[in-house]
Image (spheres, rainbow, N blue to C red):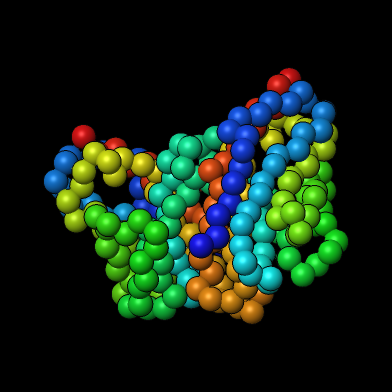
Amino acid sequence: AQTVTQSQPEMSVQEAETVTLSCTYDTSENNYYLFWYKQPPSRQMILVIRQEAYKQQNATENRFSVNFQKAAKSFSLKISDSQLGDTAMYFCAFIESGGYQKVTFGTGTKLQVIP
Amino acid sequence: DVKVTQSSRYLVKRTGEKVFLECVQDMDHENMFWYRQDPGLGLRLIYFSYDVKMKEKGDIPEGYSVSREKKERFSLILESASTNQTSMYLCASSLQVLQFYGYTFGSGTRLTVV
């Protein structure tokens, strides 16, 4: 079974600074997708960024980028120029290609952006 | 704006009650999912459905059942609520296509069983 590990339960960052959230996963599959989801306080979970395993290039979405290291099974999220609205729980998630689209989530990292 | 709607944001129920959590999506998605979210445990899959009247157990199905009579609606049922089912419940849906683009989530139902 696939597992996703987020080793940082809580983190904080000063506004306008850069922060990196860590995620490692374990799988024997070669084709899969990785995601970062954001859950603001009392609000809906939304997709931040998506990475296809067969693509070498790291995904980016505005201030959000990932460092995908397939051999190391590592998938970290970098948030640049942190904003107060980035305060949220962040979940790393994994799904293998094909099948029933069951996503495996990590335990989450609570990020606090400090003014 | 596409949506996954969960009928209740907060619910308080008594131990032993039968509880229904409703989820409706308007995106014509084939797949629907129920997760529970607990601090330190992340999201754990309870049940999912890939078609009308079809259901599959997730990782923690004990004490739960589901119903999917229509494509847009997926209900989670707690047959006899217990205090250890106090949790945040998240519904999600996704389109069955070759490339997976992620789930769309509802806003969640925070259930307290007393």
Label count reads 0
Q: Is residue A80 visible?
A: yes
Quarter of the picture containing the C terminus of chain A is top right
Q: Is residue B73 visible?
A: no
Image quadrant assignment for residue A40: top right
Q: Position of residue A87 (x, y in %)?
A: 65, 32
Residue drawn at point x = 39 percent, y = 59 percent: B59
Q: Which residue is at the front of the view, A1 or B2?
A: A1
Return the residue found at the far right: A57
Q: Position of residue B96 (x, y in %)?
A: 56, 76
Q: Relative to A99, say whether B5 is above or below.
A: above
Return the residue found at the far left: B16
Residue drawn at point x = 48 percent, y = 71 percent: B31
Q: Relative to A39, say whether A87 is above or below.
A: above
Residue drawn at point x = 70 percent, y = 55 percent: A73
Q: Relative to B12, say whether B104 is above or below.
A: below
Q: Position of residue A12 (x, y in %)?
A: 68, 26
Image quadrant assignment for residue A20: top right
Residue drawn at point x = 46 percent, y = 42 percent: B41
Image quadrant assignment for residue A22: top right
Q: Position of residue A54 (x, y in %)?
A: 77, 70
